Structures are given as structure tokens and as C-alpha cells.
């Protein structure tokens, strides 16, 4: 028999065993293959040439309204893995105030494969290194002190079974890449400019992304030129002005101050001991004016070629396209099945009707938690970047984060950026260095005054979102256009 | 415990590599982890992970490759095939402009000085009982969350550079409990850490919460105006700040690349307040120790900051090779030495009109590494103190300042030290901790924003 058939038989048998012993629900995820490769060129040296292969089984059991989870890298260890998960669930059920409930779903089967042409793991190392060396050459200049190119490639084949009879198989492919150049400015401060590989509508997720110059490598010349401008630029002074976020910066703003506060487990208080909570509560839905009327935010967004698209989540729920914020009003959040049941119980009404398909885990040895899928600002009707600049009296355009620090309930934030362009009376006047801005989330989004059209809408990739204990790093994407916010505190106090 | 068969298998694979002229290191990492997570006064996750990883590094002249395998390993032949795969990978990579260095294990080491079988096998029911005791003693009306990670880590390393090996087994635990008022929304936190089963107790957290609860219950939150304040930082905040200060100022790679706040300093320069001394001290009993550095050297006490003076940089083997320096025998055991202040910070500030006490800084990051500028916000039991008396809790407030100011404008340092567990649960189990003073009083700290809530 094959490993698949052996495991399927063992998982089916053990699922029946724990359900007979009183479990409410059980699911198992077998990572047949979880391969990743990281290549890093630092000043031309291939400092990172790392591969990782992981394979194993994670079992989650709901018993007495509480979760137990266990994982093993030994495929012969299925029985004891179920035993440990069950023992953990039984132990957890001794201290449960609100009993979790997955609700009832009919079983289904399905499969999903990321759209790709060339599996990036299968490309020969020589070809990868040659390609990256070529990009590195295009970044090399006498005046540039540091060059860094980093590529992260992933391939996952994940099988999922649950006690409702659901089986899904996913093959996920991800390709991430970043280029960064650095140099010392006149104050001997290290400045940097970077560009990350991004997705366009209708694209794919394989190695072919990387070799499409328009998505990444073709930006090298611009990145160098902009760094040169930063080196000679004055520092951004403290002030209250409009801030125009290019997608390279806007995606992290969305990630930190819309995505995370709308994860239902944070809203319900399950992340307090680590990442923090959320200023959103169950009464906020349908009422909270999160932003101006121009703010429309979706989850998933039918972007098949984003790393936040995966066919079925870690509970087998098909991914779903829906609005989180509609004309500025908060209407939904990012959810898994069990969190919905608890939220509705606590609210005493049906706040949420169905799972958002946002249960995700980073590896076979981590239990699924509520995670962002793709969280996107929908394009608006304020035209191109140039149109938005032309209507700006006093502002800055910023791109790419150098730092991000967010309040524990996501109620306030501070971002540092690589570059700013000053805008005065509808025109770009000069480049500024060391830009930063800060704000309070609700006030900030209610000052959203312009949302760009399709011309500036792209999907920025995030490969390293961290959350949960034990901690889980997750990949996703954010689609958004250029956006403008008024009355933002920017620059630092002396 | 690692069985003899497995150890022999790794040794056999190492010999096969050596006999085939492959320069390789093999690192075995086995963890037996348990984590209980608490949310809304309930166990929200109870998880066990038993995982084995093999890390292989191969060096071929100026080329290198690494590979990590998490899964089953059946035989020495399988392991050698993996080494050969990494060797091929190294061969196809690009040559560097320096010689990468294979770890050379300086001496045979076997240690389990920080291992406690009782902690490795800690019954999850014990954790449930401790949390239950806290809830019932402090008050069931509050909202509690938390996490308690415990487990063992066993490592075994060999390289083809010589016949030495290093084996270590240790246990660790990291406990946290957050108390949140369900309507007023303020949060208190309690942390505990240790290497033995008895190092965490319900009583310690109960005492801590009960001591500060009256202030929070009886006072409204206070919103600070941006400006410069006298601030007392607690041990969690100091631990995170000193770690970041050392990483960006005393790491050889950062300094050589001119990335950090010490880029233009040289050894011997005065960089911080004379009251600040920072060591890498593997003999410190408060923190988890490493017998060997990443270069395979027997770890020794090193001084990075000596009475405010820039005293040393830490070099890993490859940075040392690239820049023509010697690798340092650092253990990753960061210690900031205590001062002569009282153990209770309130005593130290009784003559000061207004002081902010910030025990922990949430979500710290660095907008400008060259200038050592960091930013983060207050969290967990932050309070306004006047003339040595706690007046009211403060709303979430942002500090944006420079390391050289924070560790330069010190007015007093506690004589008491605390172990702060800095382990994270990303990836593999890798316990780490720092030993820092219980508090530090600083002048002219920049508060740059304050929310309207906790």
C-alpha cells in the first residue's frame, strides 16, 4: 500500500475511534510535502542557500467544547498522535467557560492547485543563482554600499480529512522575492530602497513570476535612482499633512490596521497574551464607521494568484469572496467555524452566518487559527496617482516600510518608510528622507480622502505575517490602489 | 532521550561524509513541547509537538549549502544521501569572496545541567490547576488569557572537522497570564520563567495581581500629552531594549556593515551611561546557557559594554572570516548588570513629582537603525506615579526615542535582577533569556503619542 493509503486508513480508523469516545469533531492534516528554499545574495555573496523539507501529521480534536492538538513527524505514529490530541482535548475541557462548537456541515471533497507554469522548487539551482546574479549585477554601483537579494520559494501538498467526511487536497506554490540597495547619506545614516515581487490580476504563482521583468527585476534601475535621491534629500519635518500611500506602503497599513483587528479570534480575546486584542467588538458590526465612504475592503477578493488564496482553508471550508467594510461601515470579519459559533453565543444573536474560510496553519505541527486571507482595498474613482497628486495641497507620498509598530488593540500605529516625495499645490517638489507617520486607526481611515482607480491597483505579497502561540508565520497578499489620507501627523518630534 | 542507535547513525553518516571528502556538519534537534493557551478564562489550545529536525551544512571551498529535514530518518545511508544532496547543492552554488568556515567543535561536551525530567513530563492538568487557582483567587469576574510553554530540547552535533561532539539536553518553561477588565479594558500581566518544574507558581502571579489591582480598580485611565518624561522601565521593557541595543550595536556583522548605531564608534569609546555594563555570560544561573558558540568554541564571559564604554563586538564564524577577525565564544546569554538602587522602584522615585512606570513595551521596531531610534507602546500595568505613589493607570502611550538616550540618561538602576524569557515559539524550540535589572529610572524619555484607551 502507498503511504497515502496507509495514512488514510489509519486516520479514518482513529477518527472513528475518537468520535466513538465522545469527541464532537476531529480533523487531520497530512503535509505530504512542505518544501521551501531560501536564496540570499548579500553584496554578491550567496550567503543563503537553504532548503527545508518537512512532512508530518497534525491532529485536532474537539472534546467537551475544548481543543486538543498533537503533531508527529513519524507517519507510523498515527495512533499515538490521536491519543495525545484526545488527551489534550480532555484535559482542556476541564477548564472551559464557553464551550466551542463547530456547528454541523455536510462532508465534501475538493482539490486546489495554485496557478503556476514552472514549479519554483524544481528549477535548477544553477539557473536560479544565474538569474539572481544577473539581478545583482544590475544593482551594482560604486556608490551603493549594500545589495541584498532574497528569494523564498514554497511548495506544499496538504491533505485534509475531518470527521464530517470532508477530504481536500491542496498543492500550493508561492514565489517571493525582494531586492534592496543601501548607502550612507551625508549624515552617515544608512538609507535603503527596495522592491518586492508583486502580483497582477490574472497572473500565476510559479518561477515565471520572477522572470517577468515588469513584476520585479525590471525595477532595479528605478530603485537605484530613488536611493540616490534619498541620499541627498533633506529630512521630513514634523507636521500635519496629507499622506499618499503607494501600494508598497499601503498594503502594510491595511495588513496591520484592518486585517489583524478584523481577525475574529483577536476580537474575542484569544490573542491577548501575545499579539494583542482589537478595538473592534461584536457590537461594531453593521455600526462602526471604520472609514470614510470611500473605504471598501474585501476578504480573499478572488485573486487566485495571491499567496492568500488556497482553495480550502485548514477546516476544509472553501475560500470565499466577501466584503469586510462597505462604504466605510464595518460589516464582516475574518473567521473560522468555531469562532463564529462562540461569537454568536456571546452576542446572543447571529452576528456572523458562515465561516470566512480563514482558518489557517503554517505547518503540520501547528493548530489552525483565524488568519488573514487576502485583505484588499477595492479601487475607487479618484483616478490615477497623478490625479490624486494634482488635488493635494500639502502632503507627502510614501513607499515601502522600514518599520512598523502597532498598538496592542490596533487602535494606533507608527510607520517608518524608505522614501517620501513632497507634494505642494498639486505637484511633486522634492524627495525627503527618514519619513514616518503615525495615527489612530479610526480617525485615520475616516480621513481617507482619495482612492485610486484600477491603474494603480496591484497585489503586494506578505510572506512573513506572525501570529499565535506557538507562533505561526503565514503568507498572504493585499490588493490595493494608491490611497490618500488627510491630516496625518508625519515626521518625528525633536 | 536520544538513543544510542540514533547517535551511532549520525556518527556513521558523519564518517561516510569524511571518507568521501565532504566537509559537513550535522546537527540533531529534538523537541518535546507542550503549550497550553488560555483565552476567556478557558483553555483555548492544548498542544503537544514531538519533532525531530536534522540540519546539515556542507562547505566546498568558497561555496556552501544548508538543508533542514523535519521528518523520519530511517538509516545512516538515508542521512548520508541527504549530505550528498547538500554537497551537490553547495557545488552548484556561487563562490563567495571569503572562505566560509565549518564549525570546529573545540571539545567533547555532554551536559544536562539545566534538565528536569519533571518539567519535561509536566502533566497539562498541572497547568490547568495553576490557571484555575489564579482565576478563583484573584476574581472570576476578570477576563484571563495567557500561555504556558514547557518542554525539553535535545541537541547533538558533529562535524567532519574533528571527532568531537556536543550533546545537550535542557528543559525550559515560559508562563504568562494576562488579566483584563471586561468593561474598563485595562490589562495586567504576569510573567514567570524557569528550567525546573517548580519554577512557576500560582501564588507568585496571584500576589502580583493583587498588589496592583486596587490602583486600577479605583482610578480612571490617564492620557499623557506628548513630551519628555522621567520614566521607570520594568524588566520586560529593559530586556527587549537591551537585546535590541546589543544586536544593533555590538554584533560584528552589523558593525562591519555600518548598519547600526555604533557604526562610527570604535572600541573604547564612551557610548552609554557609566552605570551600564552588558555581558554575554554563560555562567549566569538566571538564564539558559549554551556550552558552545556557533563556531564550536567553549563559551566564555565577554563584555560588550563596560561602564558605558564600547568594549567588544560579537563575531560569528563566517563574519569573522569575511572581515579577518576571530570568532568570539559567545553564548547568547545577555546580562545587564544591576545597579545600587532599591528593589522597589517606588522607593527610588518618592522625591520625584511625576514619573511614568512602563513595565513592557509592545511591538517594538526600529525606524532608523543608524541612529538607534526605536518605537513601541506601553502595555500591561503602566501607571503614573507621583511622589512615590501610584496615581492612575495610563492609556496606551508611544515611546519613540534612541538607545543612546535611554541607556545614556539613566538616573538609577535597581540592585535586583530578573530573568526575562526571550524565547519565541517560531519554528523550533530554542530557549533564550536575558538577565536584567528589575527596573531602571531614565530622564527625558520621549513620549510621542497617547491613545484614548488602554
Image (spheres, grey):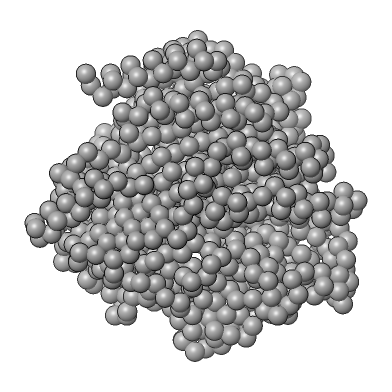
| Residue A259 visible to an observer of this rendering | no
Q: Is residue B417 above or below residue A295?
A: below
Q: Is residue B280 above or below residue B84?
A: below
Q: Is residue B177 above or below residue A30?
A: below
Which residue is situated farthest in the bottom direction here? Answer: B268
Indicate left or right for A182 with A328 as reference.
left
Out of B266 and B172, give the one closest to the viewer. B172
Q: Residue at x 50, y 25 (%)?
A: A86
Out of B42 and A444, give the one closest to the viewer. B42
- Tell me where residue B353 appears, x and y as whole percent: 88, 73
Q: Residue at x 38, y 41 (%)?
A: B51
- Tell me where residue A180 appears, x and y as whole percent: 39, 61
Out of B262 and A70, give the one closest to the viewer. A70
Out of A228 and B161, give the one closest to the viewer. B161
Which residue is situated farthest in the left direction here? Answer: B20
Q: How many marks?
A: 0
Q: Residue at x 70, y 80 (%)?
A: B340
- Tell me where residue A421 appears, x and y as whole percent: 55, 62
- Tell me where residue B131 appears, x and y as whole percent: 68, 41
Q: Residue at x 86, y 70 (%)?
A: B388
Residue A296's image quarter?
top right
Q: Is residue A313 above or below residue A146?
A: above
Residue B405's image quarter?
bottom right
Amino acid at each position: 500500500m502507498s503511504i497515502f493509503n496507509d495514512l488514510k486508513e489509519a486516520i479514518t480508523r482513529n477518527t472513528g475511534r475518537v468520535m466513538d469516545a465522545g469527541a464532537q469533531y476531529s480533523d487531520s492534516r497530512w503535509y505530504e510535502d512542505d518544501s521551501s528554499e531560501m536564496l540570499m545574495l548579500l553584496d554578491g555573496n550567496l550567503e543563503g542557500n537553504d532548503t527545508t523539507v518537512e512532512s508530518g501529521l497534525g491532529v485536532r480534536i474537539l472534546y467537551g467544547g475544548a481543543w486538543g492538538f498533537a503533531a508527529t513527524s513519524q507517519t507510523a505514529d498515527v495512533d499515538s498522535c490521536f491519543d495525545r490530541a484526545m488527551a489534550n482535548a480532555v484535559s482542556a475541557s476541564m477548564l472551559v467557560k464557553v464551550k466551542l462548537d463547530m456547528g454541523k456541515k455536510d462532508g465534501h471533497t475538493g482539490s486546489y492547485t495554485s496557478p503556476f507554469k514552472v514549479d519554483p522548487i524544481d528549477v535548477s539551482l544553477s539557473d536560479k543563482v544565474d538569474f539572481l546574479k544577473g539581478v545583482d549585477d544590475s544593482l551594482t554601483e560604486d556608490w551603493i554600499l549594500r545589495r541584498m537579494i532574497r528569494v523564498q520559494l514554497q511548495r506544499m501538498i496538504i491533505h485534509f480529512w475531518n470527521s464530517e467526511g470532508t477530504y481536500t487536497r491542496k498543492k500550493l506554490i508561492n514565489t517571493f522575492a525582494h531586492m534592496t540597495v543601501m548607502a550612507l547619506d551625508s549624515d552617515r545614516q544608512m538609507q535603503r530602497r527596495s522592491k518586492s515581487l508583486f502580483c497582477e490580476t490574472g497572473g500565476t504563482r510559479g518561477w515565471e513570476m520572477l522572470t517577468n521583468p515588469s513584476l520585479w527585476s525590471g525595477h532595479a534601475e528605478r530603485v537605484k535612482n530613488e536611493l540616490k535621491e534619498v541620499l541627498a534629500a533633506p529630512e521630513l519635518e514634523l507636521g500635519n499633512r496629507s499622506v499618499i500611500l503607494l501600494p508598497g506602503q499601503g498594503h502594510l497599513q491595511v495588513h496591520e490596521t484592518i486585517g489583524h483587528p478584523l481577525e475574529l479570534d483577536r476580537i474575542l480575546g484569544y490573542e491577548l497574551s501575545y499579539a494583542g486584542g482589537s478595538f473592534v467588538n461584536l457590537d461594531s458590526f453593521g455600526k462602526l464607521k471604520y472609514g470614510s465612504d470611500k473605504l471598501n475592503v474585501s476578504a480573499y477578493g478572488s485573486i487566485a494568484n495571491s499567496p492568500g488564496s488556497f482553495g480550502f482553508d485548514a477546516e476544509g471550508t472553501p475560500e470565499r469572496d466577501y466584503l469586510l467594510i462597505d462604504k466605510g461601515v464595518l460589516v464582516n470579519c475574518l473567521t473560522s467555524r468555531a469562532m463564529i459559533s462562540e461569537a454568536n453565543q456571546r452576542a446572543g444573536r447571529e452576528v456572523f452566518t458562515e465561516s470566512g474560510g480563514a482558518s489557517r496553519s503554517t505547518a503540520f505541527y501547528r493548530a489552525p487559527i483565524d488568519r488573514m486571507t487576502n485583505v484588499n482595498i477595492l479601487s475607487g474613482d479618484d483616478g490615477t496617482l497623478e490625479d490624486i497628486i494634482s488635488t493635494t495641497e500639502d502632503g507627502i507620498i510614501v513607499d515601502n516600510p522600514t518599520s512598523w509598530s502597532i498598538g496592542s488593540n490596533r487602535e494606533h500605529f507608527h510607520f517608518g518608510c524608505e522614501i517620501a516625495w513632497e507634494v505642494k499645490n498639486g505637484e511633486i517638489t522634492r524627495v525627503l528622507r527618514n519619513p514616518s507617520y503615525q495615527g489612530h486607526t479610526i480617525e485615520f481611515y475616516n480621513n481617507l480622502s482619495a482612492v485610486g482607480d484600477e491603474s494603480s491597483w496591484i497585489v503586494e505579497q506578505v510572506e512573513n505575517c506572525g501570529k499565535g502561540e506557538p507562533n505561526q508565520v503565514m503568507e498572504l497578499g493585499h490588493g490595493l490602489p494608491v490611497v490618500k489620507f488627510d491630516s496625518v501627523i508625519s515626521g518625528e518630534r525633536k | 532521550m536520544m538513543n544510542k542507535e540514533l547517535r551511532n547513525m549520525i556518527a556513521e553518516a558523519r564518517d561516510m561524509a569524511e571518507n568521501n571528502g565532504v566537509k559537513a556538519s550535522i546537527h540533531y534537534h529534538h523537541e518535546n513541547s507542550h503549550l497550553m493557551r488560555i483565552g476567556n478564562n478557558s483553555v483555548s489550545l492544548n498542544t503537544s509537538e514531538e519533532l525531530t529536525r536534522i540540519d546539515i551544512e556542507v562547505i566546498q571551498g568558497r561555496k556552501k549549502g544548508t538543508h533542514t529535514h523535519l521528518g523520519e530518518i530511517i538509516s545512516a545511508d538515508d542521512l548520508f544521501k541527504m549530505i550528498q544532496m547538500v554537497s551537490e547543492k553547495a557545488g552548484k552554488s556561487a563562490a563567495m569572496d571569503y572562505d566560509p568556515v565549518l564549525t570546529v567543535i573545540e571539545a567533547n561536551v555532554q551536559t544536562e545541567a539545566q534538565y528536569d525530567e519533571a518539567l519535561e513530563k509536566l502533566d497539562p492538568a498541572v497547568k490547568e490547576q495553576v490557571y484555575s487557582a489564579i482565576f478563583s483567587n484573584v476574581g472570576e469576574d476578570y477576563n484571563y488569557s495567557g500561555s504556558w510553554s514547557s518542554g525539553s530540547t535535545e541537541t547533538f552535533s558533529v562535524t567532519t572537522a574533528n571527532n568531537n561532539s556536543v550533546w545537550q539536553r535542557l528543559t525550559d518553561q515560559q508562563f504568562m497570564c494576562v488579566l483584563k477588565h471586561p468593561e474598563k479594558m485595562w490589562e495586567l500581566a504576569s510573567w514567570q520563567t524557569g528550567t525546573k518544574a517548580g519554577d512557576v507558581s500560582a501564588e507568585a502571579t496571584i500576589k502580583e495581581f493583587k498588589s496592583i489591582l486596587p490602583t486600577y480598580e479605583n482610578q480612571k485611565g490617564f492620557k499623557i500629552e506628548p513630551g519628555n518624561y522621567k520614566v521607570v522601565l520594568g524588566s520586560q521593557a529593559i530586556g527587549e531594549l537591551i537585546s535590541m541595543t546589543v544586536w544593533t550595536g555590538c554584533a560584528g556583522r552589523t558593525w562591519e556593515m555600518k548598519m547600526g548605531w555604533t557604526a562610527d564608534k570604535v572600541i573604547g569609546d564612551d557610548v552609554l551611561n557609566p552605570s551600564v555594563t552588558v555581558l554575554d555570560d554563560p555562567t549566569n544561573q538566571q538564564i539558559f546557557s549554551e556550552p558552545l558558540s556557533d563556531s564550536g568554541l567553549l563559551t566564555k564571559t565577554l563584555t560588550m559594554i563596560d561602564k558605558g564604554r564600547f568594549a567588544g563586538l560579537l563575531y560569528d564564524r563566517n563574519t569573522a572570516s569575511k572581515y579577518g577577525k576571530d570568532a568570539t565564544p559567545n553564548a547568547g546569554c545577555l546580562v545587564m548588570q544591576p545597579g545600587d538602587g532599591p528593589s522597589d522602584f517606588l522607593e527610588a522615585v518618592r522625591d520625584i513629582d511625576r514619573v511614568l512606570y512602563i513595565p513592557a513595551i509592545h511591538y517594538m521596531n526600529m525606524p532608523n537603525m543608524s541612529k538607534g531610534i526605536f518605537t513601541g507602546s506601553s502595555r500591561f500595568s503602566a501607571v503614573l506615579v507621583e511622589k512615590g505613589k501610584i496615581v492612575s493607570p495610563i492609556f496606551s502611550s508611544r515611546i519613540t526615542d534612541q538607545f543612546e538616550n535611554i541607556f545614556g540618561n539613566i538616573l538609577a538602576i535597581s540592585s535586583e535582577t530578573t530573568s526575562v524569557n526571550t524565547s519565541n515559539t517560531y519554528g523550533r524550540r530554542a530557549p533564550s533569556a536575558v538577565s536584567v535589572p528589575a527596573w531602571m529610572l531614565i530622564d527625558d524619555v520621549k513620549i510621542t503619542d497617547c491613545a484614548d484607551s488602554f
